[in-house]
Image (cartoon, helix red, strand yellow):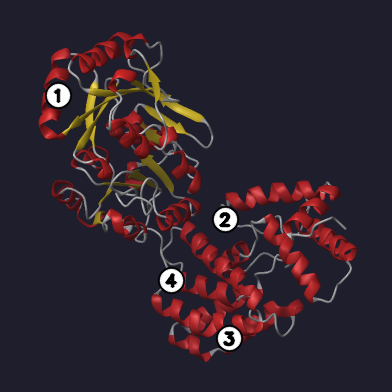
Amino acid sequence: MDNIKAIVLDIDGVIVGEKIGFNSPDPHNDVIAKMRQLRDSGIKIILCTAKPHFAIRSIIQSANLDNPHITDGGGVLISPINNDIIKQYVIEKEQAKRVIEMCLRNGIYVEVYTTEKYIVQKSQVNKITPQHTHILQCEPEIVDDLLSLDEQITKIMPVVNGESEKAKFTKLFNELNSNLALAWGIHPVALPLLFGIITAKGITKKQGALDILESLNISTDNALGVGDSTSDWAFIEPLKYGGAMDNASQELKDKVLSKGTNGIIGGHVDENGINAIFDTIIRQPTQEIVKFVAEHILTEYAKKLPYKLEHINYVMRRSILFANQIKDQQINIDMAYLIGAYHDIGEPVDRKTHELIGAEMLRKDKRLQTFFTSEQIEIMAQAVEDHRASGKTEPRTIYGKIVSSADRTTDLDDMLRLTYGFRKRQGMTDLDQIIEDGYQHLCDKFGECGYAMSKMFFNDPEFDKFKIETVALTKDKAKYIERFLIANGIKGGK
C-alpha cells in the first residue's frame, strides 16, 4: 500500500468504539495523532459517516482534516474547517412529510436533519434521545410538530430496536414508494438499536466517496476504504484498497480479503486497531534503529544538552513525516530518522560549526556500520552538514532536504522561549538586550526575506501558518515584545 493518496474512513466501529472516555465519544488520542500524521504526509483522510458534520467537528479539528467529508450518509459533502459545502442533497418536502408522518403514525422514533441541526418531536423524546445525544455530542432541537417544519431536510433517521423492527420499518418504507434511499447503521454503544439513514434518491456513502475523490482529483486506484459493517462494502468495493476491523462482520472481512494483497484486516476498534492499518501506509523506522537511537544517541543529548531532547524528538518525528511524503520506496526511513537524531550532536563542542562536527562524528561512528553501508553513512553525514537554515546552498541530497525541513520550527511561542533560554545560557542578563537581540534574529531569519523562509522543501501547512505569524511580528515590534513576554511568563513587562 505504497501509493495511497486518500483514505475513506467509517467512524463508528472503526475509530470510535464503546469504551466511554477511551475511544468514545471521540477517538483515542493515539488514533488522532496517526490521522494527523497521515494528513501531514499528504494523505487525505475522508471521514464517511451517517452522522451530521457538526457531530464530527471535534475529530476533524483535532486531526486538522481540512478536506471534504461524507456526512449524513452522503447527503452532505462538506469541509467543516473551511466551512465549504461541496454538495448538499435536499429531500423533497412532500416526500419528507410522508416519511415523517409514517414514522409518527406507527410510533417509530424519528429524527430530522438539516445541515446545521437535528430535530426531535417533543412527544417522541424518550431514552433513545440522550443515547443519541451522547453519540452525536450535541443536543437536538425539540419541536411540538415535525410535520410543521419548514426546513431543507438532508436526512431522516428512524431508530428501531433490533432486526425485527428493522424489517417492519423497511416494509412500511417500501410501501410508500417514495423514491428515497434507505440504508442502515449501528453504533457500538447503542446496540441493539439500528439507525435508519434516509436520503434523497441515489445518495449513498459510495456516491459521496466517488464525488469527493473526483473533487480532489484522486483516482480510486490511489484510495483505501475502511469499515466495520457489511454495508460499508458499498463504498469500499470501488476503491483499489480495502480494510476491515477485527471487530467487523465476517462477511465484510471476507469481501475485503477478496481484494488479495490490496485487502487488510486491522485490530479491534477498542484496542485502537485502525493504527495497524495506518502503520502499513506510514513507513516507520525499524525497531533496531529506534532502539539504537534511544540507547546511544538520545542519551548523549540527555547528558550534555538535556534541553535539546524535545527538539531532537520533534525533528525525528518530522523527518519521518517528510520522508513519507516521498512515494519512492528508495527513501530509507532509517536513514532519515538517524540523521534527525544526529543533526545537533556537535553542539556541545562548538555551536557555530556544529553541523560539521556532527557530520564527522557520524562518519566515525563505527556502530553505524552494523546498519548502513559506507555510501549510506556518507549520505547521512552530508545531510547533517547541510541541515542548517543559514546554509548558503541548497542541501545536496533529498536526505539533507528532509532534515533541513524537519528542523524548521512551527511553534512561535516555543521559538520565543528557546530564544530567551539560549541567550540566558549565553550569559545575557539584561532583559532589554535579550529582547532586542531576539527581535533582530527573528527579522534576519523569518522576516519577509529571511534566510529560513525558503528552506522548506516539503508540504507543511503548519510551517506556512508559522511564517505568516512571524512575518507579522517582524513588522510590529511592540507586538513582538508583548508576545515574547507572554510566551516566557515574564510579568509586568520590561
Mark 2 and mark 1: span between their CA atoms? 51 Å
Reading the image, the residue beneath label 3 is 363
Mark 2 and mark 4: span between their CA atoms? 20 Å
Reading the image, the residue beneath label 1 is 170
On the rendered structure, is 325 left or right of 312? left
Q: Quadrant of the N terminus?
A: bottom left
- Per the image, label 3 sits on a secondary structure element best described as helix
Mark 1 and mark 4: span between their CA atoms? 51 Å
Count neighbours of disc 3 (C-alpha within 10 A) and say few if under 14, some if 14 to 19, many if 20 or more. some
Nearest to viewer (mark 2 / mark 1): 1
Q: What's the residue type where badge 2 is placed?
A: Phe
N-terminal of the pair, mark 3 or mark 4, is 4
Of residues 80 and 361, the one drawn nearer to the viewer in this rendering: 80
Q: Locate residue 302: give its quadrant.
A: bottom right
Of residues 25 and 391, the one drawn nearer to the viewer in this rendering: 25
Q: Is residue 115 above or below residue 301?
A: above
Count neighbours of disc 1 (C-alpha within 10 A) and say few if under 14, some if 14 to 19, many if 20 or more. some
Nearest to viewer (mark 1 / mark 4): 1
N-terminal of the pair, mark 3 or mark 1, is 1
- Give the residue at x 67% y 82%: 346
Mark 3 and mark 2: span between their CA atoms? 27 Å
- Per the image, label 2 sits on a secondary structure element best described as loop
Q: Quadrant of the C terminus?
A: bottom right
Reading the image, the residue beneath label 2 is 458
Mark 3 and mark 1: span between their CA atoms? 71 Å
- Per the image, label 1 sits on a secondary structure element best described as helix
Q: Locate residue 187: give its quadrant.
A: top left
Count neighbours of disc 2 (C-alpha within 10 A) and say few if under 14, some if 14 to 19, many if 20 or more. some
